[in-house]
Image: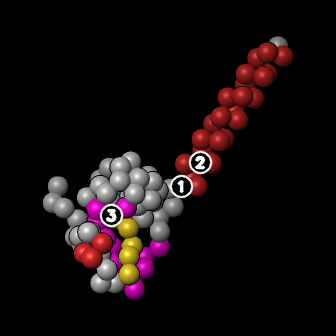
Amino acid sequence: MKHQTTIQAAIAGLLALGFAASTATAQPVPPQPSKDKCYGISKAGQADCATAKHACAGQSKADNDPMDWKYVEKGSCEKVGGKLTAPKS
């Protein structure tokens, strides 16, 4: 009986931890009208929001994925090697 209770507590803890982690990282970055969305420059885990490959901010898997975007100062995107529009899929 004690062994079963320990297993149930461990499973509940893992589920709670997984839920907390998924809600903490899935928040979109609020729109920033004073900045440009710059595609293809974000590092893995640092994109500002959703694409066809993932649900939201911080979930990008690769550096410089052309589908991922990050907010940058207006007029600086192409200077740092990015594009102002998403690639055609």
- Circle 2 Cα neighbour tier, 10 Å, few/some/many (<14 / 14–19 / ≥20): few
Q: Can you tell which of label 2 and label 3 is closer to the viewer?
A: 3
Mark 3 and mark 1: Cα distance apart in space: 20 Å
Question: SS class of the residue under badge 2?
Answer: helix
* Disc 1 target residue: 25
Q: Residue at label 2?
A: 21
Are dots 1 and 2 in contact, CB under 8 Å?
yes
The question of residue 54 being in magenta is answered with no
List x then y, in percent, for residue 10. 72, 28
In the drawing, does residue 67 fall left or right of residue 44?
Answer: left
Residue in front for this viewpoint, 7 or 36:
36
User: Residue 41: x, y in percent?
Assistant: 32, 64
Tell which of 39 and 32 is nearer to you: 39
Mark 3 or 1, nearer chain start: 1
Q: Mostly what secondary structure, the magenta segment?
A: loop
Mark drawn on residue 44: none
Q: Quadrant of residue 13?
A: top right
Q: How far apart are the alpha carbons under marks 1 and 2? A: 6 Å
Residue type at mark 3: give it. Answer: Ile
Element type at mark 1: helix
Residue 55 in view of the camera: no
Report which residue position mark 3 lands on. Answer: 41
* Residue displayed at 60% across by 41% down: 18
Disc 2 to disc 3, C-alpha distance? 25 Å
Identify residue type, mark 2: Ala
